[in-house]
């Protein structure tokens, strides 16, 4: 399995299926988090998933791999008041997600953009 495939499977199992066992299966024990609102490790990640509303949805989009780094563009509905788009960046080592960075922004629908383009095409 490529790192790209691993990240897409891990994110789908955790955020779409909400399978908490995905954390132990795909995330490294020494998981380093660079989001300033989320501590390192597994415990708070599990709490975040458990605290998501029943209406929460995650849609994976474009996935790009460069060696041990994988970027996945995703759409999070129910994470905040408005749909959020994120570029999640993972470092993969020995088949596990060991480090994470992200950049999130509120989604603006195509009809409200200056260019008429969607911010999130589903690939």
Image (spheres, helix red, strand yellow):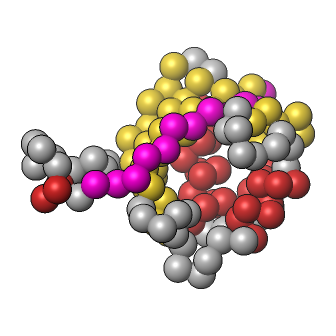
Q: Nearer the viewer, residue 75 or 96?
A: 75
Residue 19 seen in the current view: no
Looking at the image, residue 121 lies above or below residue 13: above
Q: Tell me where residue 94 sits by quadrant.
A: top right
Horizontal and vertical percent position of residue 120 = 30, 50
Residue 116, how many percent across, how many down? 10, 49
Q: How many numbered circles are shown?
A: 0
The residue closer to the viewer here, 81 or 72, is 81
Res. 110 in view? yes
| Residue 98 on the magenta segment | yes
Residue at screen point 55% across, 63% down: 79
- Residue 123 appears left or right of 88: left
Quadrant containing the N terminus in the rendered view: top right
Relative height, residue 32 to residue 62 (above, below): above
Please give left or right for residue 122 compared with residue 97 in the image.
left
Q: Residue at x 87, y 54 (%)?
A: 43
Q: Quadrant of residue 2?
A: top right
Q: Is residue 81 magenta?
A: no
Q: Main secondary structure of the magenta part?
A: strand
Q: Relative to residue 117, is residue 84 drawn left or right? A: right
Left-right relation of 83 to 90 = left
Residue 6 in the image: state x and y as whole percent.
61, 41
Q: Residue at x 50, y 26 (%)?
A: 65
Residue at the image point whose x is 23% and y is 58% from the top: 109
Q: Which residues are magenta?
A: 94-108
Q: Position of residue 68 (x, y in %)?
A: 63, 21
């Amino acid at each position: 399995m490529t790192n790209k495939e691993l990240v897409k499977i891990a994110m789908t199992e955790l955020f779409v299926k909400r399978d908490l066992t995905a954390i132990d299966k795909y995330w490294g024990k020494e998981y380093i988090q660079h989001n300033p609102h989320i501590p390192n490790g597994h415990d708070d990640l599990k709490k975040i998933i458990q605290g998501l509303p029943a209406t929460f949805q995650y849609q994976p989009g474009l996935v790009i791999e460069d060696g041990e780094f994988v970027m996945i563009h995703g759409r999070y509905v129910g994470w905040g008041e408005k749909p959020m788009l994120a570029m999640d960046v993972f470092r993969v080592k020995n088949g596990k997600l060991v480090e994470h960075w992200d950049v999130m922004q509120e989604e603006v629908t195509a009809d409200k953009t200056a260019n008429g383009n969607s911010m999130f095409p589903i690939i």
